[in-house]
Image: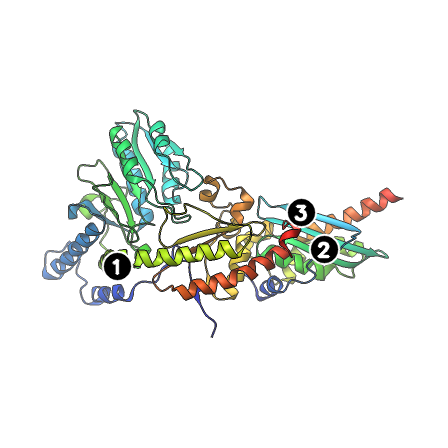
Amino acid sequence: MMRRIYMDHTAGMPVDPRVVEVMMPYFSQKYGNPSSIHSWGTKTRKAMEDARAKIVALVGAKRSEQMFFTSGGTESNNLAIKGVAYRNKDRGNHIVTTAIEHMSVINPCKALSKEGFNVTFVPVDKYGVVDVQSIEKAMTDKTILVSVMYANGEIGTIEPIREIGEIVHREGALLHVDAVGAAGQVPINVENQNIDLMSISSSDMYGPRGVGALYVKTGTRIQPIIQGGGQERGLRSGTENIPAIVGMAKAAEIAKAEMKAEGERLSQIRDKLIKGVLESIPSSFLNGHPTQRLPNNANVRFSYIEGESLILSLDILGIACSSGSACTSKTLEPSHVLLAIGLKHEEAHGSLLFTLGRQNTEEDVDYVVNALPDIVKRLRAISPLTPKELLS
Amino acid sequence: MYTEKVLDHFRNPRNMGEIPDPDGVGTVGNPVCGDLMTIYIKINDNRIEDIKFKTFGCGAAIATSSMITELARGKTLEEALKISRGDVADSLGGLPPIKMHCSNLAADGLHAAIQDYLKKKEANK
């Protein structure tokens, strides 16, 4: 049988079997509504509060009531940005964010800019690192919110959040951090890192999809964007998705317990993958920061060829990964992240993103490193852009 | 998302390469958009005697390039000029809607190569 190697964990992850196991009773056996006062309800209420405590523990928050469950990373980002903007418009109408945020940050910001808010997108350097000083320069006395991602899921770069937070607080604004790509992979401490609001997703740490959370520091002025029965202390209405919440908490617990060992293991095979590819393929380059990067992220690019044809070629050999090429996007535009780090369109098209996971081994990496040179060579032979000296 | 036929032409492209002394060359697309295609033709007695391609681009761009060489080989110039983008997509069993515009460039590339040949011929008169 053909070897099958999945290295597209940022796009989708399996749910850990240990997570599935703890979720199961909450579908058909423990189904009470946590808002009900009878014993069915109090049972699920307790499960939900235990879950909240585990997620609080993952990110170093002090109190359970600082964590609010949502439907996932996208909703958490929307709630943080719109909820803070609307609630604080008496204090100012300016938001600062970066050029490499997830679309669930960029698009709410763009929507707010049509409602009287001003948004500044600060640039990043060639490694994707946000310059602390450019955040400071962008802020005005009207700035109410700064939103910077903890780590970029596409190029893996980890941002200097604590330093950014110091500036943001000194200037009297709030710091929101999109930690969807980072939570569960690298240690986060909302207290030490000056974070006021932080988005987390379950499905990016081997938990079920459709559930996430927003950390909101006590005293932060925020209003709901979804209204209804007043669940989650009024900030997020809707009957709580208990099986998913319990699953997310188990995923957070496992991630916390295994973070150090798994982080070291992944970093090691990630570096082997990057090194192996760059050494065996001419005109290949690393995207993102060489050391300050997520343990699971290897993003490389190859001159003269296009990412979708690389993905198709790898798929034939049983290897799954992603690309920042326009041809793999819904918009036919190459990744805004790759353009923001200064790549030309044609360079961005030739990028390949491997995101490793728990089941990937060193042998998987060897297989990919062995397979890739011939694929690149074949596509370069087909490409009219390839210089003659690379074809021999 | 792709048909078996597209994947077959992607895996085993027909007539890939350059013609050393071509009678016509057509380049269409733009690497900025992610697709660039060059078609080379050799003409004998008003017929396309030989045709080759080189393509930078996605699976659809490579497969349509390969397919156009099969469709055009042996055709008269008049017949070849009638081959449309739609014909290429149909011969491949269809293309995903999003690829119909950006990557389905092969007919344009063939037409550009024929125009190049006709222009050179006119200049040599």
In the picture, measured across the screen, residue A351 lies left or right of residue A53, that is: right
Chain for disc number 3: B
- Inter-mark Cα distance, 2 to 1: 54 Å
Residue A317 image label: none
The amino acid type of the residue labelled 1 equals: Glu
Label 3 with label 2: CB-CB less than 8 Å = no
Chain for disc number 2: B
Residue B73, given in percent of the width and then of the height, sits at 76, 61
Quarter assignment of residue B43: bottom right
- In percent of the image, x 46 and y 70: which residue is there? A3
- Inter-mark Cα distance, 3 to 1: 52 Å
**Residue marked by disc 3:** B28
Residue B18 image label: 2
> Of discs 2 and 1, which sits in the foreground?
1
**Residue marked by disc 1:** A258
Residue farthest toward the bottom in the current orientation of the protein: A1
User: How many residues crowd mark 2 within 10 Å: few (<14), some (14–19), many (20+)?
Assistant: some
The amino acid type of the residue labelled 3 equals: Val
In the picture, measured across the screen, residue A342 lies left or right of residue A385, that is: left
Residue A257, given in percent of the width and then of the height, sits at 23, 58
